[in-house]
Structures are given as structure tokens and as C-alpha cells.
Amino acid sequence: MASQAPGGSLRDDHTRDQPVAAYTTQDHATWRHLFERQGELLRGRACEEFLDGLHGLGIAAGGIPDFERLSDVLEAATRWRIVAVDGLVPDLIFFRHLANRRFPVTWWIRRPEQLDYLQEPDVFHDIYGHVPLLMNPVFADYMQAYGEGGLKAADLGALTYLARLYWYTVEFGLIRRPEGLRIYGSGILSSKGESIYCLESPLPNRLPFDLLRVMQTDYRIDDFQSTYFVIEDFQQLFEATRPDFTPYYQELRGRPKLKPDAILPGERIVERTLGAS
Ligand code: HBI
Ligand code: FE
């Protein structure tokens, strides 16, 4: 990472104070570049809720934002706050933060040579990709329910299934709108190439969201997705997480894992409708 290693100590919940002094001018320039590039791309591609959240947070192109300031705005809207972490944290720690309406945000930013791709989340992916939708009350409740579900899934040895749900919704989800498909997944919103590919390429399958089908489907972490799942609205996601998942996990244990590009007999592909449908 370009930012210098932070000074302060790491707390036992894997959080630290955001090391704002560690950011270099290059780091802020990298933020500006990514922010402006995605801003151009996402008009007409990102869902309105994302654009409204980004605007509501007052995140500027200027440079890497202050997490405490963003948390004050976010907390007033949906009672979420941001906590700074060094990168991916253990599942249980992650779920516990989500269950308490704390979103873990990696504090450092990618190097200039990583502008188009990096494996693990950095501050641009987490702040720009994830935080704006936490301003939406329904999605904010879904994310807390997901965290609570994760703690239960851990007890049931069912984390693989729940990781797929996170991947195909929070990270790579699409939503259907009268004017066409729109993006809400953070992994797409923070990626130049995938913001275009997910809506316009004929290659990937786009399937209607189905909870069990999602949790049965494996995913790729090193390339664009082979399948995107399309929801009708965030309420559908939130409702899907209401029931106790124990019987779902039971059912899934009896089903084979599906490859990322699988299509089952009779499955309906959602059409690529760009602009007026
Ligand atoms: N940690 N900081 C961070 N960010 C994530 O998105 C994250 C994580 N740990 C685990 C994890 N995601 C995945 O296992 C989710 O599917 C839960
Ligand atoms: Fe993410």
C-alpha cells in the first residue's frame, strides 16, 4: 500500500483510528482519479439510491474523506458508523461489526499501478462502493440483518452459503428499474470495467434473484462475474433475510454446488435492457 504504515495501535475488534496523517499526496490524487472516473461511468448505470447516498454523504472528489465526519452524517441517517480496519477481518469480527451497524472500512488506498484491479478491498472500494447505500434505510437494515445472520451461520457451519449471498447481492448485485437494469453491488460500483461489463456484455447470465439459487452458486473472485442476480427492490432483499435460515442450510446441504456460469433447465434469463426497455 502507498500509504505509510500507521502509528496507532490496533484494538481487539481489529479497528484502529483512521491514520489520516499517513496519507500521501499521491494517495489523495489516486482517490480523486478513481472518484472522478467512476462518477462519469455510473450516471445511467448506478441505481438512484446509490447516487442519492453518495450525494447525501457529501463525499467530495477532493481526497480520502474523514471517517468520523462521514460517520456523523451516516449515523444521523441510518444509525450506521464507519470503523477503520487494516483490511479483511475474520468473519466473526466482520459479522459482529455489521450486527452492531458498524461498517469496517480499509483505511489505506491502492497504489497507482493498481487503479484497474486489486484483490482485496481498499478505502475506495469500501467508502465509494459500500457506504453510500448504507444511507438507504432498507438496505441499512438488510446489512445489519446480514451481520446477525452471519453470526448464526457461523454456529451452524454455514458460512459458505452466506458468503455467496453477500457476494451476489452486496458485492455484485443488479436491480431492475423501468428504465433498465441498474447496479447496486459495491464490487461493481468501485470497478471501471465491471460497471460496463455487467450491464452491456452478452457474456454473463443475468438471473432473477432467488435466495436458495444464490446460496447454491459458487463465485469467482479473480475475474468479472459469470452470473449476476437481479432484484426488483431492496425490500425483496430485506424480506429474504427475515426467516430463520436453518431449514435453508439443511436443504442446501442436499444440493450440489453450482458453477458460477451454470444455467438450470427452465431458468429465465433477465434481458439486457439498456435505456428505454
Ligand atoms: N472484512 N474488512 C472486511 N471486509 C469485508 O467485506 C469482509 C471482511 N471479512 C469477511 C468477509 N468480508 C466475507 O467473508 C463476507 O462474505 C462475510
Ligand atoms: Fe466489499
Image: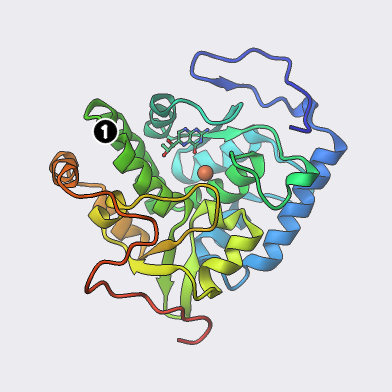
Residue sitting at 79 percent across and 25 percent down? 4
- Specify the farthest residue to the bottom: 276
- Number of other residues with Cα within 10 Å of mark 1, as a class: few under 14, some 14 to 19, many 20 or more: many
Find residue 43 and report its image quarter. Answer: bottom right
Foreground: 28 or 69?
28
Identity of the residue drawn at 30% across and 54% down: 258
* Location of residue 194 in the rendering, given as x and y in whole percent from the top left corner: 58, 61
Examine the rendering and report whether any part of residue 232 can be seen.
no
Q: Residue at x 26, y 72 (%)?
A: 267
Q: Nearer the viewer, residue 215 or 101?
A: 215
> In the rendering, at what x and y percent does residue 56 appear?
59, 54
Task: Judge from the rendering whether residue 158 lies leftward or rightward of residue 37; answer left or right.
Answer: left
Say whether residue 221 is visible.
yes
Question: In what quadrant of the picture does the N terminus appear?
Answer: top right
Q: Nearer the viewer, residue 12 or 154?
A: 154
Which x, y percent locates residue 6?
73, 20
Disc 1 element: helix
Q: Nearer the viewer, residue 131 or 250?
A: 250
In the picture of the structure, the residue carrying the numbered disc 1 is 153
Specify whether tag 1 is near ligand 1 (CB below 8 Å).
no
Q: Is residue 261 above or below residue 139?
A: below
Q: Is residue 122 above or below residue 7?
A: below
In which quadrant of the rendered image does the C terminus lie? bottom left
